[in-house]
Amino acid sequence: MTSTDPWMVVGLGNPGAQYANTRHNVGHMLIDLLAHNAGVQLSSHRSGTHCADIRLGMLPGGIPGPRVIVATSDSYMNTSGGPIGRLAKFMNVDPSHLLVVHDDLDLPAGSLRLKTGGGEGGHNGLKSISQVLGTKDYNRLRIGIGRPPGRMNPADYVLARMSGSELDDLAVTIAQAADVVEDIVTTSFSEAQQRLHTRQGA
């Protein structure tokens, strides 16, 4: 892949209205925002995804920014690797230009981190993608959702509906995440990672 090849940004989550405002669906929320900001709607694709081909950001001289494929899987979280792998193959996107956006229990709510490769931290969506791609060497944008209160089961926590104030706070985080994605595709992953982690004190 070269620096001019498109990025594919995939948001993890579960399909269906019952999951729409749950912590596990922060990836879907980010893709919806990126599509909305670009003035497009996600379209059904034969890979088993909903996706759109957009331009993100601006380059010097007011030139529209790089081409980015944004997508969500139509399958549930633990089998999302199949549709995402098929779309990446169809679009000829290498894992080095794949950014997977997901919720992360191990980060405080509202925090953002970028990483390439490494373990999946027990995240079933990442496990499915790694298995299908045959590699863990793809990029991730981790959106912190914090740990569940008290003895609440983590599975219940990530699928629980959030309160109005929690959704308001999350909307701010999602907007910040959209800025991070734009920074990645208009500069480079490593530069964007350094800027993000410096800002957040990582």
Image (spheres, rainbow, N blue to C red):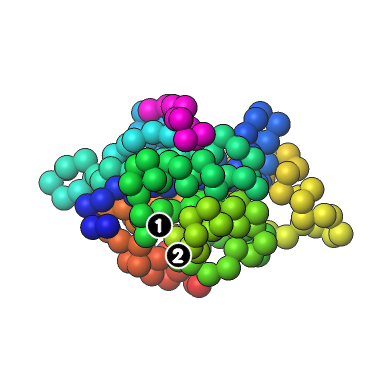
Going by the numbered disc 1, the residue's amino acid type is Pro
**Residues packed near mark 2 inside 10 Å, few (<14), some (14 to 19) or many (20 plus):** some
The residue at the point 13 percent across, 46 percent down is 61
Going by the numbered disc 2, the residue's amino acid type is Asp
Label 2: element kind: loop
Residue 37 picture location, percent across and down: 39, 35
Q: In which quarter of the image is residue 180?
A: bottom left
* Numbered tag placed on residue 95 in the rendering: 1
Q: Does the magenta stretch include residue 45?
A: yes
> Which span of residues is magenta-colored?
40-50
Q: Of label 2 and label 1, which has the lower sequence position?
A: 1
Residue designated by label 2: 137
Is 137 or 192 nearer to us in this picture?
137
* Residue projecting furthest to the left: 61
Residue 23 picture location, percent across and down: 66, 46
* Numbered tag placed on residue 145 in the rendering: none
Q: Does the magenta stretch include residue 121?
A: no
The residue at the point 28 percent across, 43 percent down is 67
Q: Distance between the residues labelled 2 and 1?
A: 7 Å
